[in-house]
Image (cartoon, rainbow, N blue to C red):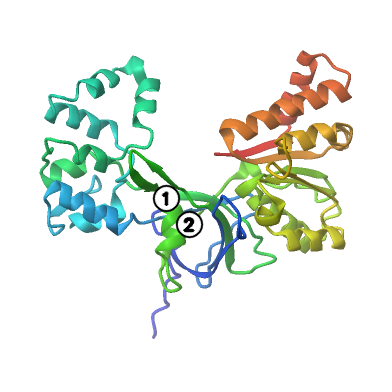
Amino acid sequence: MSKLSSPPPLHSRKNPFPAKILVSQKLNLEGSEKETWHYEFSLVGSGLQYEVGDSMGIFPQNNPHLVQELLEALHFSGNEQVKNKEGETFSMREGLMKHFHITQPSKQFLEAIVEKSPGATKLRELLHPDRKNELDRFLWGLEVIDFLLQQPPIRFTPDEFVSKLRKLQPRLYSVASSLKAYPEQVHHIAAIVRYESHGRKREGVATTYLADRVGKNTPIPMFVHVAKGFRLPEDPATPIIMVGPGTGVAPFRAYLQERKAIGAPGKNWLIFGEQRARCDFFYRDEFAAMQNEGVLTRFDTAFSRDQAYKIYVQHRLLENSKEVYAWLQEGAHFFVCGDEARMAKDVDLALHQIVEKEGAMSSEAAAEYVETLRKQKRYKRDVY
């Protein structure tokens, strides 16, 4: 009797699915100061299921040019056998490519530099726990390679060096598609990080891996990262307000696809921002089609560089404060996705001001109203 074959293992963070790229397309047109890409991956055969609002974890690889530079600075051949904390053994080159974080230095690495370099008095002082902010400022734009190239050269044994490195972690990208619209696919938007500091070109590990070093047949290990706190309302009739500048528009593209696919009667309001309408208007045709179909009830844009003064998404909220408050009073859920440091704080302040003004409340009462939205899971943020 033939033995029944066991079901394929479930793909997860520990056993990611090797997805292949179907589409990689630059979203910015000529004249843009930014580099943002749209990616479509095949999930055929993976069994992976995600909900809109979730993220996917992607395991990147480091830049082979930087790996070679590190090997030369360390006087290693790359064939030395090393182990990670899990006890796996691989060559130094493979370790630096796939397993270790080789850009931003860890605290352990910095402590080793201080120990091996008597002249590193400034760094020694900055490692004091009370001076964390100063240390962060000092380290901005500096990487492991910078410390290794200092004179006199600092020497490590292979095992010693990898013991000072952190593990290379997966990067999370918001899902920008609905499985109901694109079965067995997942779409992402990524802003590519490239800059110069201390006379060297720097780059984001995962974003440049996807943009520069991945071919059609390169398997990209990925897994679903569930984000239950950023789900669409359970009742499809509930209105939603979505604030998503730049790559923050990703989950809202997915929301709109989902609500269209299920025929959700709820109103949808999207506020999108970028630098210039001419070259930074992501998914212009898609969103126009959704407006024509009635899926996208309201669509406001804020292009910061298209006029003498800057206009951002929070300004559009404030300009439409009466309507924003009316939607909230109707039970709308308020979503924000994108930059935590500035945008999300400015949008939060605008939301408080809108509630205070339109609800004729004190600032304390407005704060309580916004806090109630949070508690009712009607104010949801996916910020990074």
Q: Residues within 10 Å of mark 2 (few under 14, many from 20)?
A: many
Mark 1 or 2: in front is 1
Indicate the quadrant where residue 111 lies: top left
Image coordinates for residue 208, horizontal then vertical, percent = 43, 56
Q: Is residue 95 visible?
A: no
Residue at image mark 1: 170
**Above or below for 232 versus 221:** above
Per the model, the C-alpha gap separating discs 1 and 2 is: 9 Å
Q: Residues within 10 Å of mark 1 (few under 14, many from 20)?
A: some
The residue closer to the viewer here, 246 or 277, is 277
* Contact, mark 1 vs mark 2 (Cβ under 8 Å): yes
In-image side of 44 versus 209 (left or right): right
Q: Which residue lies at the image location 25% right of the left edge and 48% below the top edge?
A: 86
**Above or below for 284 versus 268:** below
Q: Which residue lies at the image location 39% right of the left edge and 26% below the top edge?
A: 137
Indicate the quadrant where residue 350 lies: top right
Amino acid residing under circle 2: Phe
Q: What numbered label is drawn on residue 223?
A: 2
Nearer the N terminus, badge 1 or badge 2?
1
Image coordinates for residue 207, horizontal then vertical, percent = 46, 53
Image coordinates for residue 205, horizontal then vertical, percent = 39, 51
In-image side of 355 versus 181 (left or right): right
Amino acid residing under circle 1: Pro
Check disc 1 and report its element: helix, strand or loop. loop
In-image side of 93 versus 296 (left or right): left
Q: What numbered label is drawn on residue 102?
A: none
In-image side of 375 versus 158 (left or right): right
Q: Quadrant of the N terminus?
A: bottom left
